[in-house]
Amino acid sequence: MGLPPALERAIEDATAAIPAPALTKAAAELGRDYRETAVQRAPRVASDAARAAYLEVRMRAIFQVNRVLDAQLQQLCPAMDIRSVLDLGCGPGSATLAARQTFARLQTATLVDREPQWLKLAERLIAATDAPLTAAARYMAADLRGIAKLDEHDLVVISYALGELPEPARKAVVERAWESAHGAIVIVEPGTPRGFEVILGAREALLAAGACIVAPCTHRQRCPLAGADWCHFDIRVDRTRRQQQIKAGTLAYEIEKFSYLIAAHQPAAIAGGAARIIRHPLKKTGHVILDLCTGDGSAQRLVVSRRDGQSYRDARAAKWGGLWRPVIDGAT
Ligand SMILES: C[S@@+](CC[C@H](N)C(=O)[O-])C[C@H]1O[C@@H](n2cnc3c(N)ncnc32)[C@H](O)[C@@H]1O
């Protein structure tokens, strides 16, 4: 699952004016910022070279993560009709562009960022790839900390942006965002302990506001991983040749780790008691070990043996991040 070819071309055009050495240097700084700020994140994407590097080395992975989450929302809330998206802290519009790939009826988008240069880039990428959205999209230069309630949108997304706000401001931003969500809200952060902490804070605010948690949690209880571990998932993203040149000597793919939350006004269409698989299943000879976050709000380890027939076949096919049906017997 790569970027749509038109978006790849638009990124190439948008970054063409930046000399290769400047792009390589900015990409290295961006990578260092993300690693160093695993605890305190506030990446400095404040020059044309830094923004171009973001398009080249971050946007693909973030776009793919958003696609995975949009597909989950679609699967878990099949009756939800998503025609509009509000993209808060939009950057180059990664979340909006991803939503357009999933929600066939999506017609309009409002993109909000405090940096006018990001809004210009988002507008440029949308104009190059999506004529219907170009006519309908609105761009707002605003600090999320100051926004009042915005117009309602079917889907509100805060992608890799909430963690850039100082802690005391986040709760109010999540509350305003939820008030603007007619259908659902998706919040995603890097899959680090700090990213998870940001997601936990958002979860608390959304539960207090009466939201239904759609994913990853299958319950409304206290998170069983809070304070002990961090709930995160990953996807593998292929690197383009250009990306490999910019990040000289690196692999042909990268693993993007993320923590997230999807909440909605309606509950998810999942069986009561279903559990989320929160680690890579350990597929041993004759048995599979599944780490689950269960429907009653506890973290449990389930060992499924070859003797368990269909459950064993299901466990062999199971994936980190997927749902496991309500089989709690046998948890160790
Ligand atoms: C890491 S980028 C993520 C961009 C985009 N959402 C994505 O997923 O690719 C974070 C974005 O949040 C924006 N941002 C950070 N703090 C903000 C604030 N207080 N108000 C509005 N935007 C903010 C930044 O300007 C930047 O565009």
Image (cartoon, rainbow, N blue to C red):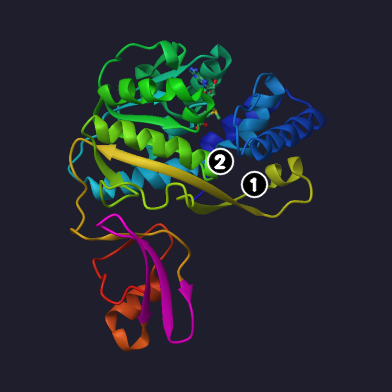
Residue extending furthest toward the front: 227
Tag 1 secondary structure: loop
159 in the magenta segment: no
Q: Any mark on residue 206, and which?
A: none
What residue sits 26% from the left and 66% below the top? 325
Q: Ligand 1 near label 2 (Cβ, under 8 Å)?
A: no
Q: Which residue is mark 2?
A: 60
Q: Position of residue 57 (x, y in %)?
A: 64, 38
Q: Is residue 283 above or below residue 122?
A: below
The residue segment tinted magenta is 282-304
On the picture, is 331 further left or further right than 143? left
Please identify the quarter of the rendering in which residue 187 is found: top left
Q: State the predominant SS element of the stretch in magenta.
A: strand
Q: Position of residue 133 (x, y in %)?
A: 37, 24
Tag 2 secondary structure: helix
What residue sits 40% from the left and 57% below the top? 321
Q: Position of residue 164 (x, y in %)?
A: 53, 26
Q: Position of residue 125 (x, y in %)?
A: 52, 26
288 in the magenta segment: yes
User: Mark 1 or 2, which is nearer the eye?
Assistant: 2
Given the image, on which type of amino acid does mark 1 rest? Thr
- Locate the C terminus and report the quarter of the image it occupies: bottom left
Q: Which residue is mark 1?
A: 240
Please identify the quarter of the rendering in which residue 47 is found: top right
Count of labels in the image: 2
Q: Ligand 1 near label 1 (Cβ, under 8 Å)?
A: no
Answer whether labels 1 and 2 touch (C-beta < 8 Å). Answer: yes
Mark 2 crowd level (few <14, some 14–19, many ≥20, 10 Å Cα): many
